[in-house]
Amino acid sequence: MTKPKVFIARPVPKKVEEFVAEYCEYKKWDHDEKISKDELIENLVDVEGLLTVGTSIDEEILSRSPKLKVVSNISVGYDNFDIEAMRKNGVIGTNTPFVLNETVSDLVMALIISTARRITQMDQYVKQGRWKNEIGSDLFGADVNHATLGLIGMGRIGKCVARKAKLGFDMNVLYYNRNRRPDVENELEVEYSDFDDLLKKSDFISVMVPYNRDTYHMIDYREFDLMKESAIFINASRGQTVNERALIDALNDKKIFAAGLDVYEKEPVEGNNPILEMCNVITLPHIGSATKKTRFDMAMLAAENLTAAVLGKVPPNVVPELRDL
Ligand code: DGY
């Protein structure tokens, strides 16, 4: 029996490739740099499945890939999918939920602690041969324990952050979410809050929502104006949920105290982005899920989604907007 053809557009671990090979005939892009759109289109002409990360899947790609049935993302976020175009072309999209919850929430906690205690800044001090007697009280940090954490969004990763903040640091956790989560409120004793109140009361504010039409720039000038001057702003979700110019202005105007970022409006961050000059901003290169184990698990789950779809089965993780296709 002939195997369905698929294209792997990002390097994946050997074991994942071997898994795909069991069920599919495959071609792969084996370079660290991203594949160009033209090369991608060339490789999709005769395949039924695409395994990728973050590639914009638009009408042009879909209309030129007549056999394509599935785009399998190696990520939980799927803001790279043009959902309307995928519906129109009858192509399903899958993602990798669950397997990265703990790893991404670890990173959110790391950003909270590092910004509060100026970890990266103090690390530089020691490496420059300086010591703590040079540190005036203006460089003292802020306490994480017992502080108020405001979570904007209470999905799977938000819930993991809430648990770590609550049980590990005895933080007072507020959350705002489209739908109230009585299950999480009961389990973790977190408190639902009105959006503006959360911004006004929180010492740490972390954006935990996916990026879509509704969440574009949900944190803008108005929202930074509501925050405390001592507030620390964290974003490890998607850069486009925040108006980055408003964040830069809020930091420059000392409307907030610091920020911890894993994501940006434009990635990679441009070299002239003023954020890179700010010692009270921790800048990470979108590594929320980047541990060996989790990245392996994500690639394997994406491979399972891909093979299921091209073999005519229902993949375990079709994104909600495309489940009825
Ligand atoms: C995700 O899975 O969406 C993470 O941001 C990694 O891209």
Image: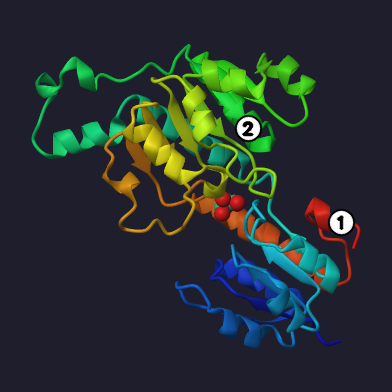
Please name the residue shown 45% across and 72% down the image. Answer: 32
Q: Quadrant of residue 230?
A: top left
| Quadrant holding the C terminus | bottom right
Q: Quadrant of residue 16?
A: bottom right
Question: For this rendering, which residue is in front, 160 or 143?
Answer: 143
Question: What x and y, as percent, mark residue 66?
Answer: 80, 84
> In the rendered structure, which amino acid carries the disc numbered 2?
Gly
Please name the residue shown 41% across and 36% down the image. Answer: 260
- What is the number of the mark on residue 323? 1
Side of 244 where 20 appears, left or right: right
What is the distance, in whole Å, between disc 1 and disc 2 at their CAs?
24 Å
Q: Name the element at disc 2.
A: helix
Category of crowding for the residue at label 1, using alpha-carbon neighbours closer than 10 angstroms: few (below 14), some (14–19), many (at least 20): some
Question: What x and y, as percent, mark residue 74?
Answer: 63, 60
Which one is earlier in the sequence, the residue at label 1 or at label 2? 2
Q: Quadrant of residue 92?
A: bottom right
Question: What x and y, as percent, mark residue 213?
Answer: 69, 49
Pointer 1 and pointer 2: residues touching (CB < 8 Å)?
no
Q: Name the element at disc 1.
A: loop
- What is the number of the mark on residue 158? 2
Question: For this rendering, which residue is in front, 217 or 107?
Answer: 217
> In the rendered structure, which amino acid carries the disc numbered 1?
Arg
Q: How is colour applied across the structure in the image?
A: rainbow
Q: Is residue 186 visible?
A: yes
Side of 133 where 124 appears, left or right: right
Question: What x and y, as percent, mark residue 306?
Answer: 75, 67
